[in-house]
């Protein structure tokens, strides 16, 4: 079916990493596909890390953030039904792509970048959001190949960590889809930013654990954690979203990705 397309190709690593070298003077667009932890959102909550991402780049870069709250990779790509099929995946109401992906396919050009970050909602046991890890990886591969077909460069991002504490330490909580993202990166030769690990490291540096009092929404209303997260374990206030976006931008530098050449 349309949403479960074929495998992406695997060109050499130079093709995946080299978009900012000789072409650094060209104007490029960063297209972002994702969920509410990435989406622009609305004040005061939630705000995703993509909201202020453009501020990291020179005027040569335009960021088009088409992340949508509440979506899995399948519901971002397709109109998905409420029924599980015989393959264990949700049945599509239509194989036609959703408007966000169609707009990307139309607008993407040589030298652009495609960031993909899902995995927050995909582990839902019920349709329409449920996505098994095999289909999750296939969808990532299809999107990566579509970008490459247009001369753009795909980049996968593991799902950002929520607040989950083990005593005084924050721990990863997105292991299944973080691992699937890394596996897709290896399978399709696409760079991966491990935002789950980077965000957990940040939470530890900020001393968010242990959570004060009971582990409820009330623990997110005061102190440093109250200025970072909304009243839940997952979504960010504007200040938190900026710090998560900082991690993504720094990872471009640390991993030597071509897009780093456009950072301020």
Image (spheres, rainbow, N blue to C red):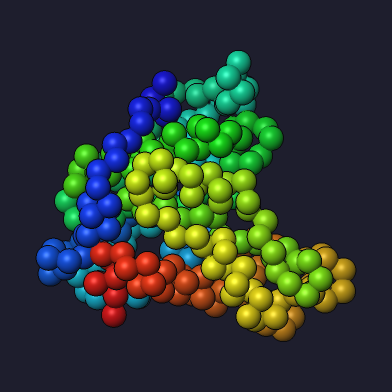
Q: Position of residue 106 (x, y in %)?
A: 23, 42
The residue shown at (83%, 66%) is: 215
Instruction: Answer above or below: position of 110 versus 101.
Output: below
- Figure quadrant of residue 103: top left
Q: Quadrant of the C terminus?
A: bottom left
Apparent side of residue 210 relative to residue 202 in the rendered image (left or right): right
Q: Nearer the viewer, residue 201 or 60?
A: 201
The residue shown at (39%, 72%) is: 254
- Figure quadrant of residue 91: top right
Q: Nearer the viewer, residue 257 or 65?
A: 257
Report the residue that reaches farthest toward the top.
86
Instruction: Answer above or below: position of 85 versus 80.
Output: above
Report the residue that reaches farthest toward the right.
214
The residue shown at (22%, 51%) is: 15
Q: Position of residue 206 (x, y in %)?
A: 65, 81
Apparent side of residue 168 relative to residue 48 in the rendered image (left or right): right
Instruction: Answer above or below: position of 58 versus 130.
Output: below
Apparent side of residue 226 relative to residue 85 in the rendered image (left or right): right
Residue 178 shows up from this direction: yes
Report the residue that reaches farthest toward the bottom.
223
Q: Quadrant of the N terminus?
A: top left
Q: Nearer the viewer, residue 211 or 172?
A: 172
Residue 77 shows up from this direction: no
The residue shown at (63%, 31%) is: 127
Figure disc tally: 0
Q: Position of residue 140 (x, y in %)?
A: 42, 41
Q: Position of residue 92 (x, y in %)?
A: 50, 24
């Amino acid at each position: 079916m349309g949403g479960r397309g074929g495998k992406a190709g695997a060109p050499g690593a130079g093709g995946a990493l080299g978009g900012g070298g000789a072409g650094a003077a060209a104007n490029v667009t960063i297209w972002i596909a994702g969920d509410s932890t990435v989406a622009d959102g609305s004040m005061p909550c939630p705000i995703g890390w993509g909201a202020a991402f453009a501020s990291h780049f020179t005027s040569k870069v335009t960021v088009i953030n088409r992340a949508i709250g509440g979506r899995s990779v399948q519901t971002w790509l397709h109109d998905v039904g409420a029924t599980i099929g015989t393959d264990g995946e949700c049945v599509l109401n239509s194989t036609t792509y959703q408007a966000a992906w169609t707009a990307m396919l139309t607008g993407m050009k040589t030298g652009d970048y495609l960031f993909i970050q899902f995995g927050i909602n995909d582990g839902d046991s019920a349709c329409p959001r449920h996505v098994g890890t095999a289909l999750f990886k296939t969808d990532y591969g299809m999107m990566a190949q579509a970008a490459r077909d247009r001369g753009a460069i795909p980049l996968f991002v593991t799902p950002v960590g929520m607040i989950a504490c083990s005593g005084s330490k924050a721990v990863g909580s997105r292991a299944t889809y973080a691992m699937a993202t890394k596996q897709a990166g290896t399978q399709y030769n696409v760079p991966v930013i491990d935002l789950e690990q980077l965000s957990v490291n940040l939470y530890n540096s900020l001393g968010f654990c242990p959570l004060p009092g009971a582990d409820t929404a009330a623990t997110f209303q005061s102190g440093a954690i109250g200025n970072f997260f909304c009243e839940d374990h997952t979504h960010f206030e504007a200040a938190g979203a900026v710090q998560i976006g900082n991690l993504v931008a720094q990872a471009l530098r640390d991993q030597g990705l071509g897009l780093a050449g456009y950072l301020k």
